[in-house]
Amino acid sequence: MPKVKTNIQKRLDDALPLLSSKQQELLADFADYLKSREEWEATMELLSDSKMKREIEEGMEQVRRGETHSWRHIRKNV
């Protein structure tokens, strides 16, 4: 099934070939920045939840103690 492009995707597709390579590079850098910022905000949102933060810290402590399972073991037993 073909993916339907949004108006924004169409606008970007139309504009991209008209930009210089330097402008395309700036656009790509800005897109990377926006993606990174969104990921950071999501991380901060999770860490602001005290229960979630405790669970993450406990998981990290379990890793430090070597209380882990291999991916093959988990996959085999799911």
Image (cartoon, rainbow, N blue to C red):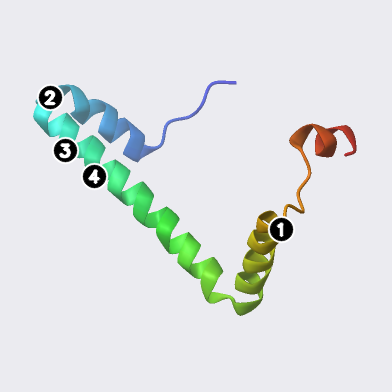
Which three-letter amino acid code belongs to the residue tagged 1?
Arg
Residue 6 figure quarter: top left
Residue 1 x/y as whole percent:
60, 21
Label 3 with label 4: CB-CB less than 8 Å:
yes
Q: CA distance from mark 2 to mark 3?
A: 9 Å
Residue 49 x/y as whole percent:
58, 75
Looking at marks 2 and 3 on the same chain, the residue that comes earlier in the sequence is marked by 2
Q: Is residue 40 above or below residue 5?
A: below
Judging by the rendered image, the residue that carries numbered circle 4 is: 30
Task: Judge by depth and name the residue closer to the eye, 5 or 56.
Answer: 56
Which three-letter amino acid code belongs to the residue tagged 2?
Ser
Judging by the rendered image, the residue that carries numbered circle 3 is: 26
Q: CA distance from mark 3 to mark 4?
A: 6 Å
User: Image check: 77 left or right of 63?
Assistant: right
Which three-letter amino acid code belongs to the residue tagged 3?
Leu
Residue 54 badge: none
Q: Nearer the viewer, mark 1 or mark 4?
A: 1
Q: Residue at x 23, y 40 (%)?
A: 29
Residue 65 badge: 1
Seen from this angle, which residue lies furthest bottom?
50
Q: CA distance from mark 1 to mark 2?
A: 50 Å
Label 1 with label 4: CB-CB less than 8 Å:
no
Looking at marks 1 and 4 on the same chain, the residue that comes earlier in the sequence is marked by 4
Q: Secondary structure at mark 4?
A: helix
Q: CA distance from mark 1 to mark 4?
A: 40 Å
Q: Tag 1: Cα neighbours inside 10 Å, few (<14), some, or many (≥20)?
A: few
Looking at marks 4 and 2 on the same chain, the residue that comes earlier in the sequence is marked by 2
User: Image check: 49 left or right of 29?
Assistant: right
Q: Residue at x 40, y 55 (%)?
A: 38
Looking at marks 1 and 3 on the same chain, the residue that comes earlier in the sequence is marked by 3
